[in-house]
Image: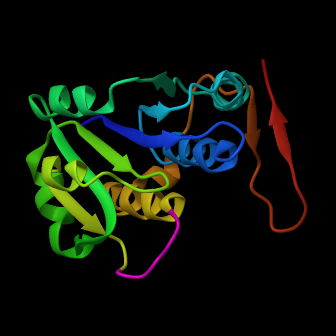
Amino acid sequence: MPAIWILRLSHRVGRDFRVTTHLGLVGRAFGAKGMYYSGDKDKEMEKSILRVNERWGGEFKVIYTRQPIKLVNGWREKGVLIHLTMYGLPIDDVISEIRGLNKDILVVVGGAKVPSIYYSLADYNIAITHQPHSEIAALAIFLDRFYKGEQLKFEFSDAKIRVVPCEKGKRLYKGP
């Protein structure tokens, strides 16, 4: 199974904490291996995501990069670069092709304004919808379509906390 990583562009401390954190949480829960981010270095955001690993399991990584273009160019030598944008091709038209490549994937999600170079460097510019929407929702839908819903069954063997599904109320299992 190919590894999927996320690149969050142009993180801004104080302004983007929740959005970037939620990109990491969705990526982790839906099967991504980790997230690179550029812009402002944010140790608190990193710690917030890594604390979830400690309690809920998994080895999701959060890595800061000062040079996202260098990262992208290096990635293109070994894998596929996907840019999620409302201007791209419809996801349903290309997701089977991407799955069939069987290569590691770097999914680029924007910040305030995505520099045009990412549109050129991407192997695929993919639209979840051609309407304004959240990059968090776009990432979740991309991962869901890529994994065909199987990510909803992923379990982390090292989890200290697990949800016990129930019709009403909330139940948790807290183990060793």
What's the residue at 13%, 42% (across, down)?
102
- Residue 119 x %, y %: 20, 56
What's the residue at 21%, 63% (across, down)?
95
Would residue 4 appear left or right of 176 to someone viewing this image? Answer: left
Would you place residue 154 above or below residue 116 in this image? above
Closest to the observer: 134 or 27? 134
Closest to the observer: 7 or 159? 7
- Residue 90 x %, y %: 24, 76
> Magenta: predominant secondary structure element?
loop
Q: Is there any visible trace of residue 13 in the rendered image?
A: yes
- Residue 82 x %, y %: 24, 51
**What range is drawn magenta here?**
130-134
- Considering the image in quadrants, where does the N terminus appear? top left
Would you place residue 8 above or below residue 130 in this image? above
Would residue 173 appear left or right of 91 to someone viewing this image? Answer: right
- Considering the image in quadrants, where does the C terminus appear? top right
Closest to the observer: 87 or 82? 87
What's the residue at 42%, 82% (across, down)?
131
Q: Is there any visible trace of residue 149 in the rendered image?
A: no
> To which quarter of the image does residue 168 belong?
bottom right
Does residue 132 belong to the magenta stretch? yes
